[in-house]
Image (spheres, helix red, strand yellow):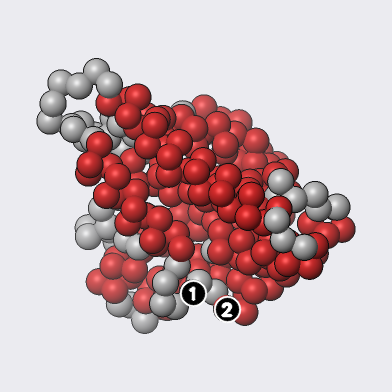
Amino acid sequence: MPDFSFSLTTFMVLAASLLDRLLGETKYFHPIVGFGKLAKRCEQRFNYPSAMDSHSQLRGLLCWCLLVLTPTLFISLVITQLNATLQLIAGCVVLYITIGGRSLQEHAERVRLDLESNNLPAARTHVSWLVSRETAQLDAQGVSKSCIESVLENGNYALFAPIFWFCILGPAGAILYRLANTLDAMWGYRTSRYINFGCAATLLDDALNYIHARLTALSYALVGHTRNALSCWQTQAPSMG
């Protein structure tokens, strides 16, 4: 793992954030999109949801290790072979790829403009890009609420979390988290297809999110109506599982 000092880590976080702000997501091919396609093929090959299979959870765990740990270790090993300058550049690029602050803002802005122009069908369509729930029957208030909730939640997944793990483990941490979170988004459903195969992806993503999700919630509370936010957090968080 590259040995980055606090000042260099801070520089890379700022540089990657600036790249994200200026460039957003890559327009033609994003590595996470390619990873998602690979994960889909892996799941189709090794998940047998129609069969009474006692080894589904184990296969899900092995697929998670193959898809997450292998590229994480490989990329980390490659970066350690670079000189100091190239390590610095590689760290910035890796973190830039794993965060998505501008993309999240653009999605939310699109929904806001739809609502302001009273284009509810478009707002429903665009908010569906942010949430996994059914949006076809939402009214304007429901669309707005879903959009705000998704932005707050994905602020953790798309911004705070990769930066947190980057600060802890360097580029390997950002890669590890981003890939693990992607698999949870793909396999972490309580349906007959994924309830067993996706169990490892769900539990491991929960473990990776445990600390920084609470730090994210605390940061939201501190910049908002702090007392009310902390009260809601205390009363509502347990019911969210």
Local crowd size for mark 2, using a 10 Å CA cut-off: few (<14), some (14–19), many (≥20) = few
State whether residue 111 appears in this view: yes
Q: Residue at x 34, y 68 (%)?
A: 126
Give how far across and how far down residue 100 sits, in percent. Answer: 54, 63
Q: Are marks 2 and 1 in contact (CB under 8 Å)?
A: yes
State whether residue 225 appears in this view: no
**Residue 30 as seen in the image, left or right of residue 23:** left
Task: Estimate the spatial distance between the alpha carbons at disc 2 and disc 1, rounded to whole Å.
Answer: 7 Å
Q: How many marks?
A: 2
Q: Residue type at mark 2: give it.
A: Leu
Give how far across and how far down residue 215 sits, in percent. Answer: 68, 42
**Seen from this angle, which residue lies furthest top?**
54
Between 159 and 173, the residue placed more toward the observer is: 173
Q: Quadrant of residue 64?
A: top left
Between 50 and 237, the residue placed more toward the observer is: 50
Q: Secondary structure at mark 1?
A: loop
**Residue 187 as seen in the image, left or right of residue 220:** left
The residue indicated by pointer 2 is 23
Q: Residue at x 34, y 53 (%)?
A: 38
Q: Residue at x 72, y 61 (%)?
A: 82
Local crowd size for mark 1, using a 10 Å CA cut-off: few (<14), some (14–19), many (≥20) = few
Q: Residue at x 32, y 61 (%)?
A: 128
Give how far across and how far down residue 176 sits, in percent. Answer: 56, 45
Q: Residue type at mark 1: give it.
A: Thr
The residue indicated by pointer 1 is 26
